[in-house]
């Protein structure tokens, strides 16, 4: 299960990764979104931006259908912005990618409202945290073109799109008769707010009598679980108004177990507690069926989205004031709370609800066609532990939703869901329903099969909605172009960026992967570390991340931390949470303590020398030249004093290290070392930098392309340099900012201009340049022509195994800009591990290709690689080698 949103990037922000915060504007002030900090114009390349497809990956707490226009729907996420449904393609399109670095908190959406009078208008209440983790106040974004562009009204308080209680709602609502009037329920004791000018300005409804009092955990000193969850939903009774005049009756849900529902019958002039209401639980949702005069309310004993032990469903008759308990099961039999709640606008009297926190064995969905008098369940037991489902599941479009699990009954895979707080029947189509889970949006288009006794089909309806928090990225020189370390869903190996991978990393399944690395000269060797409730926190792969096996934790490990693979994959250095830095040879069956480096240091490897590793902690840079056994503090000075730092060593050049990071109250920028960290030089043209990555060099360039998320020339953005940092080009624009992008960045070593960007909730963004003059790689490198010579030497041999060195010499007159060497083994030998190149093998046929740093071979020069292999019976040498269409001389 994925019960937590462990967003290490955001927690790191609390430690100072963000420099400053957006200006705090009084309620009512407005500004055009995405225009802050425009000091100078920076030349920009033209890029095309897409997501590496995962489809989903996070909690979707709200789905909103427009009540006036068919097929107009929106989804809100807790950290990944808002989306609009595109009916023609059955996909979602992101709406808040223009949110910039300083306003990163506005990628968390606590509520969304689609205007029921003018469907082109949509509103978003944005802000991720109400505690110190988010330095900025919340805002209400308003759009008159369905989210294509926005204006913003800043609020004098914070909002909590990723706080406890975020699945309750909707807190934001538009008057269905006078759509210039909106209400917003605030957390933190800030009360109820109203706008009378279509969201441009806001003021508090000072006579609203209750600001709420429920907190999830009063003892939480961080303020995350101890914040008052406040006003949680607003619902208009459209039967009490007419076009152009404010709706008279308004219901408001408050996070107060004794006083949960309030009402105004005079368009908000006065308010009173609704008499006779249930007490002892929180009202998560209030949905009104105006045709029958019923307000349905879903109750839980906690605010969600993970918890909930008891719950009830009630129906309130608006005309008589009668409350009726319509719970599908007795309260004593609930082990969950009710939250997801919807009515069928085409068939008044049909109502559905979810048991949102039924983690085991599965979530439950309830349906009634008689106003709650009787109910049926989406699944039920036949004879325990066997169960019968009213539905079938088809996750072929997102196969990883099975989690690679093989559970015992009554659990099934894939699950119907968990954290199911959003549930909506399409108001124009009784057959279509969507609901959000902790990992996706599920839906059906034949829902009414439920009533006829035939099965309805549940499928992911999530394509285009990408909601993962990205902690680390890697793009090896061979194999899969992208490996990712993600929150909640662990990470993926993308062999095709346009397709959803079949499975996340498994064996083990980390709840969050915190760091990963590959061996530069042997990219088949990959290591990852992460968090897990129980079990190992490290895993290894010898096939480029396709398959994994668990390592062994040293004593005291409590979390993933960071990890580094030696250049040839023969050794690893790990800095886990809970204990000090450790090193191992082989695949982590035993670990030894590294000397001279403090616990919690960030570790990386040199990309050429397999025994050289680097570390950073609290302003000090550390170097090991003995495989991580001992580290020595460098004399380098002037580096950032805190731990908000990311650094990497350049492939192909020993000791070439780039370091980014810092904070506004101290050293902050980009540093370069060419002597293995002994000294660093700060780049004067980079004001602030938070990531650094490398990609294929531009045509004619002698140095790999640099990428960074930085502030250069007064502008925050994603930047690229093809001249070793002497000049920079901004490659994103104001429409593509994605909030906070400070966790990781990497170029692609095989495609010039391609860059992969880690976001905190919008998944992995990748961009491709239109700069064809810069050397875009349209396909495989051209094969060399001219003469070649090969020396093949077996340097060691033992029972069943051997080691060989191969030297390839350019004996022609022209330089090579990439090479592939092919041969066939005579006796069925097999390559087990190869370094300084990449390889594939099919039967006896072996193909070895250059990696990023050794593709250029001048006339008269040589390139070498080595490998270990297996043999049986006879270990004869290959008799022929080919370089493209050329036969090589064998020496």
Image: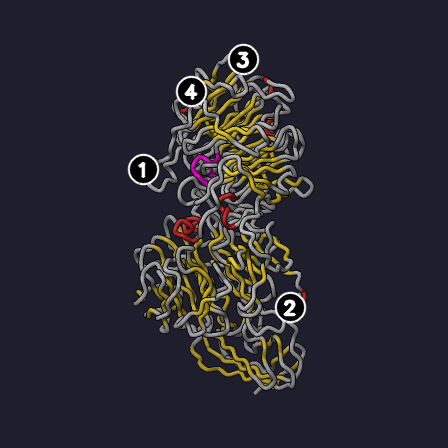
The range drawn in magenta is: 159-167
Residue 247 numbered mark, or none? none
What whole-number distance in Å separates the C-alpha atoms at marks 4 and 3?
A: 18 Å
Instruction: Identify whether 180 is placed above or below 502.
Output: above
What residue sits 44% from the left and 39% below the top?
Answer: 163
Q: Secondary structure at mark 2?
A: loop
Is residue 381 visible to the viewer in this orientation of the structure? no
Residue 572 counted in the magenta span = no
Q: Where the C terminus falls, by quadrant? A: bottom right
**Residue 861: image location, x then y, percent:** 57, 84
Q: Are marks 4 and 1 in contact (CB under 8 Å)?
A: no
Q: Secondary structure at mark 3?
A: loop
Residue where numbered disc 3 is placed = 319
What residue sits 43% from the left and 42% below the top?
Answer: 3
Residue 278 numbered mark, or none? 4
Q: Where the N terminus falls, by quadrant? A: top left
Mark 4 or 1: in front is 1
Instruction: Identify whether 15 is placed above or below 127.
Output: below
Q: Are marks 2 and 3 in contact (CB under 8 Å)?
A: no
Residue where numbered disc 2 is placed = 775
What whole-number distance in Å separates the C-alpha atoms at marks 4 and 2?
A: 68 Å
């Amino acid at each position: 299960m994925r019960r937590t949103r462990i967003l290490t990037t955001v927690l790191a922000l609390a430690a100072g990764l963000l420099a400053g915060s957006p200006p705090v504007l009084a309620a009512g002030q407005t500004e055009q979104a995405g225009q802050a900090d425009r000091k100078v114009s920076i030349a920009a390349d033209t890029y095309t931006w897409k997501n590496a497809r995962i489809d989903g990956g996070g909690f979707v707490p709200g789905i909103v259908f427009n009540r006036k226009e068919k097929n107009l729907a929106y989804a809100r996420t807790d950290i990944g912005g808002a989306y609009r449904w595109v009916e023609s393609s059955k996909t979602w399109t992101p709406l808040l990618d223009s949110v910039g670095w300083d306003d990163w908190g506005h990628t968390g959406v606590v509520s969304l409202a689609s205007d029921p009078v003018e469907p082109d208008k949509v509103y978003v209440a944005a802000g991720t945290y109400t505690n110190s983790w988010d330095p900025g106040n919340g805002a209400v974004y308003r759009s008159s073109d369905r989210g294509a562009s926005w204006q913003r009204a800043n609020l004098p308080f914070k909002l909590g799109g990723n706080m406890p209680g975020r699945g309750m709602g909707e807190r934001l609502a538009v008057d269905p008769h006078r759509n210039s009037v909106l209400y917003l329920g605030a957390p933190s004791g800030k009360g109820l707010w109203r706008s009378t000018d279509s969201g441009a300005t806001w003021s508090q409804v000072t006579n609203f009598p209750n600001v709420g009092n429920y907190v999830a955990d009063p003892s939480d000193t961080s303020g995350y679980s101890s914040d008052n969850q406040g006003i949680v939903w607003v619902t208009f009774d459209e039967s009490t108004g007419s076009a152009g005049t404010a709706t008279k009756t308004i219901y408001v849900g408050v996070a107060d177990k004794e006083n949960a529902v309030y009402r105004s019958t005079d368009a908000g002039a006065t308010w009173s507690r609704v008499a006779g209401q249930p007490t002892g639980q929180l009202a998560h949702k209030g949905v009104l069926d105006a045709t029958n005069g019923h307000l349905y309310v879903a109750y839980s004993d906690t605010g969600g989205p993970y918890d909930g032990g008891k719950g009830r469903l009630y129906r309130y008759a608006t005309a008589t004031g009668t409350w009726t308990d319509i719970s599908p099961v007795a309260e004593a039999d609930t082990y969950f709370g009710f939250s997801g709640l919807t009515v069928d606008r085409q068939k008044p009297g049909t109502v559905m609800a979810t048991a949102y926190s039924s983690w085991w064995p599965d979530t439950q969905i309830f349906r009634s066609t008689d106003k709650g008098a009787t109910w049926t369940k989406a699944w039920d037991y036949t004879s325990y532990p066997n169960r019968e489902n009213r539905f079938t599941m088809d996750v072929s479009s997102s196969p990883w939703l099975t989690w690679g699990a093989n559970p015992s009954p009554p659990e099934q895979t894939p699950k119907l869901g968990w954290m199911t707080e959003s549930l909506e029947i399409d108001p124009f189509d009784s057959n279509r329903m969507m609901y959000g889970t902790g990992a996706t949006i599920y839906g059906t288009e034949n829902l009414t099969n439920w009533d006829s006794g035939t099965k309805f089909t549940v499928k992911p309806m999530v394509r285009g909605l990408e909601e993962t928090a990205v902690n680390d990225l890697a793009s090896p020189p061979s194999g899969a172009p992208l490996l990712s370390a993600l929150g909640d869903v662990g990470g993926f190996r993308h062999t095709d960026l346009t397709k959803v991978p079949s499975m996340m990393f498994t064996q083990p399944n980390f709840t969050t992967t915190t760091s990963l690395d590959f061996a530069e000269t042997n990219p088949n060797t990959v290591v990852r570390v992460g968090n897990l409730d129980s079990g190992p926190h490290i895993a290894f792969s010898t096939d480029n991340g396709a398959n994994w096996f668990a390592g062994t934790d040293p004593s005291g490990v409590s979390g993933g931390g960071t990890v580094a693979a030696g250049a040839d994959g023969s050794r690893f250095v790990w800095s886990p949470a809970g204990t000090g830095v450790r090193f191992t040879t082989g695949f982590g069956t035993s670990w030894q303590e590294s000397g001279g480096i403090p616990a919690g240091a960030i570790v990386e490897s040199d990309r050429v020398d397999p025994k050289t590793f680097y570390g950073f902690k609290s302003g000090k840079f550390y170097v090991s030249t003995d495989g991580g056994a001992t580290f020595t503090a460098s004399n380098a000075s002037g580096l950032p004093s805190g731990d908000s730092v990311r650094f990497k060593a350049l492939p192909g050049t020993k000791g070439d290290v780039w370091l980014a990071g810092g904070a506004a109250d101290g050293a902050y920028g980009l540093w370069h070392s060419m002597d293995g960290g002994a000294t660093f030089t700060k780049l004067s043209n980079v004001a602030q930098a938070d990531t650094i990555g490398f990609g294929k060099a531009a045509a004619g360039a002698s140095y790999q392309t640099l990428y960074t998320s930085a502030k250069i020339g007064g502008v925050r953005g994603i930047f690229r340099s093809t001249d070793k940092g002497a000049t920079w080009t901004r490659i994103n624009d104001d429409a593509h900012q994605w909030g906070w992008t400070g966790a990781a960045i990497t170029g692609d070593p095989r495609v010039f201009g391609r860059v992969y960007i880690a976001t905190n909730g919008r998944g992995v963004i990748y961009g491709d340049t239109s700069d064809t003059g810069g050397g875009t790689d349209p396909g495989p490198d051209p094969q060399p022509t001219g003469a070649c010579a090969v020396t093949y030497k077996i340097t060691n041999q033992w029972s069943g195994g051997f080691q060989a060195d191969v030297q390839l010499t350019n004996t022609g007159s022209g330089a090579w800009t990439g090479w592939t060497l092919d041969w066939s083994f005579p006796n069925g030998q097999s390559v087990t591990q190869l370094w300084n190149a990449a390889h594939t093998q099919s039967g006896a046929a072996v193909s070895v290709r250059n990696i990023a740093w050794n593709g250029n071979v001048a006339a008269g020069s040589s390139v070498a690689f080595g490998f270990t292999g297996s043999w049986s019976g006879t270990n004869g040498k290959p008799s022929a080698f080919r370089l493209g269409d050329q036969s090589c001389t064998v020496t």
